[in-house]
Image (spheres, rainbow, N blue to C red):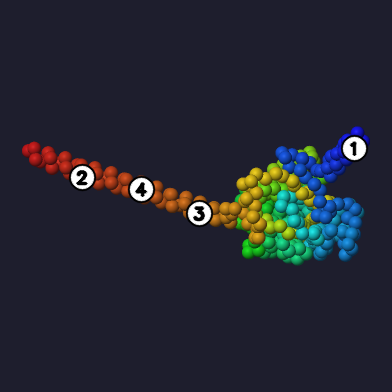
Amino acid sequence: MASIWGWCVLGMAVLWLAFCTRGRSESGTEEFLKREHSLTKPYQGLGASSAGTYWDITGNTMVTAHFVRLTPDLQSKQGAIWNRVACLMRDWEVQVHFKVHGQGKKNLNGDGLAVWYTKDRMQPGPVFGSKDLFSGLGIFLDTYPNEEKQHERIFPYISAMVNNGSMSYDHSQDGRRTTIGGCTALVRNLNHDTFVVIRYLKRRLTVMIDIDGKNEWKDCIDIAGVRLPLGYYFGASSATGDLTDNHDVISVKVYQLMVERTPEEGEDDEEVLTPSVDNFRLQGDDLESEQMSGITLFFISFFSLVGVMVLAVIGIIVFQKWQEQSRKRFY
Ligand SMILES: [Ca+2]
């Protein structure tokens, strides 16, 4: 009898523990907060090279009690935070609580911030304060439209890029050619909390935003067939140029996602060595080929029409000649 009670108590304890450490659960997916990849207040040890923190800072990053400021609202600053622990989870979710604010009037602020899952860490560079030709995933919250002719994009704009180290992020085009998806996110100077969540589950990349103060996620990017290697690092970076903003990170929460795989899904799960996206094509190539095919179609239609008209005229002339000749024969 006593042993039954013992097992019951143990069972309850296990259930309770499981319940307490679990995050949200939806559609058969469970989330577990991973402390070694997360950064939350009071940012203990951050900024010192102590063993008490899982994160490093670089550049102009400033740590306060309430936020980590990647750049202040001043020109030509850049900063970043990088997780020290390589991510060995197949499926994960990273929730970033951030704030972008400054004195600049509409469209006179910049440049934005990036959230990373990359091979290299702590390498300053031109892509929102981090290195170009990166390997991995970059999610860019771009607050300034550098490209004059905007292709139906309203800024601030969130976009995603997956790189195998060979593609350069083109700032003058706001990375339009190399993007795999995006959405508008009006995030500046808001009085409520703003969040972005990046979810990588069964090679599907989903980005959602919570920026309206309604405590609900809105879809932004959803792409299947995204292949990211294990062992990369989470990070966030930002830069200002002529235009400025405060770019603050309040927290980074990384969850491990636990989900069942069908045998087929398990088979398709061989180790990824280089980042890639299935069927990826540079943006603009589509556009050019579409424009090209449009022009081709126009010429084909035009010459077909001319051809038909010429044939019709020849036909009428031949018919008239034939009629004349047959009349002559009758006389
Ligand atoms: Ca830009």
Counting residues from the N terminus, which is met first, the one under dot 3 or under dot 2?
Answer: 3
What's the mark number on residue 323?
none
Q: Name the residue under label 4.
A: 304
Q: 217 or 24: nearer the eye?
A: 24
Q: Can residue 297 be seen in this view?
A: yes
Q: Mark 2 points at which residue?
A: 318
Counting residues from the N terminus, which is met first, the one under dot 1 or under dot 3?
Answer: 1
Front position among marks 2 and 1: 1
Front position among marks 2 and 4: 4
Q: What is the x, y in percent for residue 180?
A: 63, 52
The quadrant where residue 28 appears: top right
Q: Is residue 180 visible?
A: no
Counting residues from the N terminus, which is met first, the one under dot 4 or under dot 1?
Answer: 1
Residue type highlighted by circle 2? Val
- Is 86 left, or right, of 296 in this rendering? right
Q: What is the x, y in percent for residue 55?
A: 83, 59
Residue type highlighted by circle 4? Ser
Callout 2–callout 1 Cβ contact below 8 Å: no
Q: Name the residue under label 1.
A: 3
Ligand 1 closer than 8 Å to the CB at disc 1? no
Q: Gap in Å between the C-alphas at discs 4 and 1?
A: 91 Å
Counting residues from the N terminus, which is met first, the one under dot 3 or under dot 4?
Answer: 3
Counting residues from the N terminus, which is met first, the one under dot 2 or under dot 4?
Answer: 4
Callout 2–callout 4 Cβ contact below 8 Å: no
Q: Mark 3 points at which residue?
A: 289
Q: Gap in Å between the C-alphas at discs 2 and 1?
A: 109 Å
Q: Is mark 2 on a helix, strand or loop?
A: helix
Q: What element carries label 1?
A: helix
Q: What element carries label 4?
A: helix
Residue 105's place in the image compared with 131, above or below, is above
- Is 223 left, or right, of 30 in this rendering? left
